[in-house]
Amino acid sequence: MSFTHRIGPKSYVFSDLKDLMAKATPPRSGDMLAGLSATSAQENVAARMCLADLPLKHFLSEALIPYEADEVTRLILDTHDGTAFAPVSAMTVGDFRDFLLSDAATPAALAALAPGLMPEMAAAVSKIMRNQDLVLAARKCRVVTRFRNTIGLPGTMAVRLQPNHPTDDPAGVSATILDGLLYGSGDAVIGINPASDSLPVIERLLNLMDAVISRFEIPTQHCVLTHITTSIDLMNRGAPVDLVFQSIAGTEGANHSFGVSLSVLKEGYEAAKALKRGTIGQNAMYFETGQGSALSAGAHHGVDQQTCEARAYAVARAFEPLLVNTVVGFIGPEYLYDGKQIIRAGLEDHFCGKLLGVPLGCDVCYTNHAEADQDDMDTLLTMLAAAGVTYVMGIPGADDVMLNYQSTSFHDALYVREVFGLRRAPEFEAWLARMGITGADGRLLTPSANHPLLGFVAERAA
Amino acid sequence: MIARDPWLAFARHTPARIALGRTGASLPTAEVLRFALAHAQARDAVHMPFDADAVARGIADLGFSVLRAASAAPARDVYLRRPDLGRRLGDASRVALAGGSGAPADLAIVVADGLSSAAVHAQAVPFLAAFKPWIAAQGWRCAPVVVAEQARVALGDEVGVLLKARAVAVLIGERPGLSSPDSLGLYLTLAPAQGRSDAERNCISNVRGAGLSHAAAAFKLAWLLKEAFRRGVTGIALKDESDLLLEGATPPGRLPA
């Protein structure tokens, strides 16, 4: 079905729904690379006007990627909750934006609505929202998850402590874990991207993190971000796996390029839950996503990258994750060219994820061949904090020496806490105070040279 | 005013920026500026114009014949937005290479700017100086070395076809990290042809002073090339076992028979 929008004497024609969605998307290099973007600024706005007039329920009758061809489409349509959708079923995309920003859209109303929303609906409305709209609406969405602590409570923001090392050296990893903990980071997860794929190396990292968490009774969880099939192997060997990680995308083909399918994800999810390693909850999955992955895999079906990304959140929510984050600026300038595009994409991803009921965090990041710098990251981090982001990354000095990109630092998290008064996960906050790392007000104390955490690193270095 | 961290001694275990200290919630001035300098070095590595003349001269001085080429990406900003253009030759280069090719060769070598011309400026000539004795020792016939501008790895496939090479090695500037702005990557592909996937290549990365030495990288490439010819494959089916022969960081003087 084609769509036409008239502005004065000029008619703009969009060949089908995915063409309309792509041309309505704020400009970004990945859609240009795919040949999907609007060819003029006016066509871009015409597409947004046309999209605003589209009834939301149209998405239930026209699949962007055919039901027969894609298991993600089947998941989305088969699990759609018509009762939850009912309150907005008569709205157009434009009405839906107005609703989201209205006082009627309370946190409770939005939480009840989430199972009734398809990712394509979230993507569509985001395309006609300004950055401030994406902040305001996301801030009203509450998603709370639990494993050994409580993530996502209003007024909190968590941090993933990311102690990567170029050779997975135990002393080096331990030193960075210590640095992060003493800077008050690590409530979301202590999560390592390993340099090696080797099972013994990964098992050693798991044992190391397990030792520090159990020895100091830290109310947090750990993860080695390795392929889900590797985690399944490690669980079968009896290794201490807290969270099971996987990169996911919004189409079956892109997931195939990551070496996964919904059934493989289900296998990992069930294995992790069966271990019951969580103390106050069993949200045991950790997913990462990012705009451009479907195009990069040649599996985007002519659908714009932001809509593909929103579909990844439908995959995520099927497995009750503790944490999901978009690695927004990692993929490179051929998908998100500069700071402006990265900032926009980060806010879109966070909004869409939260609206769909997913505990979305963001790796606020960039590579050195993108037109971006620390100032852009400060802007995105500040806006995401205002939007109630679930968690961000914590990396020493923002420089990931294994993955060669820049993310957010332990200091950045302290900045956000100071500006917005954001607190840590309550169990972790209490632990920091108990360990003398923070005072009663949550601010860092001057650390002692005899702190017991220092002894842990000294042992690993010996 | 600056709160120093009493675990600074642990910084020797990791290149990560730990124990930076703080003023309030924020980084000390010296750390903000140190980071800015590292980012500036990485940015300049991406955007520094590629001095293909000097690189070509240096390679010719080693005794290689040299050809020049450019990808279909006319400028750096286009190159960054359009990876597809960086993967194929410009029309003029295609004609020139087709005309300049001689007898079939065992190996074609492409020296490509990639994402760090600084890496190619610093590493390409010393690496080739270290690799040349391996070519001689194995008796491999080498096509002229192609110095390619605005190029990505897959450009080597088209070059390999035009130069009738059994294998192509692409030496390319890697995406610069904050602490490694001048790192060279080596990609080896047997039976180069358009449409080869990255899973069909072997990669040796982090070739630079503070990373993998030129001598060790040259040995690893020679090992991979010999094994590729022997087993008829590169990529995920050819596992790099050359580390087993390295004694510390020092490569042996010859390949095993």
Image: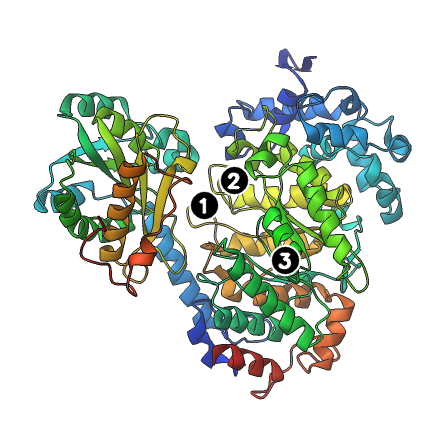
Query: Label 3 lies in what chain?
Result: A
Residue named by callout 3 = A237
In this rendering, the answer to whether B154 lies above or below A248 is above
Pick whichever of labels 2 and 1 is earlier in the sequence: 2
In three-dimensional space, the C-alpha distance between marks 1 and 3, rounded to whole angstroms, equals 42 Å
Q: In the figure, is residue B191 to the left or right of A236?
A: left
In this view, the mark in front (2 or 3): 3
Circles 2 and 1: CB atoms closer than 8 Å: yes
Please state which of residues A228 and B64 is positioned toward the viewer in this rendering.
Answer: A228
Q: Position of residue A445 (x, y in %)?
A: 64, 81
Res. A15 visible in picture = yes
Q: In the figure, is residue A78 to the left or right of B188?
A: right
Query: Are the residues under badges 1 and 3 in a single subunit?
Result: yes
Query: Label 2 lies in what chain?
Result: A
Q: Position of residue A312 (x, y in %)?
A: 67, 38
Q: In the figure, is residue A360 to the left or right of A83?
A: left
- Label 1 is placed on what type of residue? Ala
Residue named by callout 2 = A336
Residue named by callout 1 = A370
Pick whichever of labels 1 and 3 is earlier in the sequence: 3
Q: Residues within 10 Å of mark 1 (few under 14, many from 20)?
A: many
- Label 2 is placed on what type of residue? Leu
In three-dimensional space, the C-alpha distance between marks 2 and 1, rounded to whole angstroms, equals 8 Å
Q: Residue at x 60, y 29 (%)?
A: A304
- Label 3 is placed on what type of residue? Arg
Query: Label 1 lies in what chain?
Result: A
Q: Residue at x 87, y 46 (%)?
A: A106
**What is the basis of the colouring in this image?**
rainbow
Looking at the rendered structure, the secondary structure element under dot 2 is loop
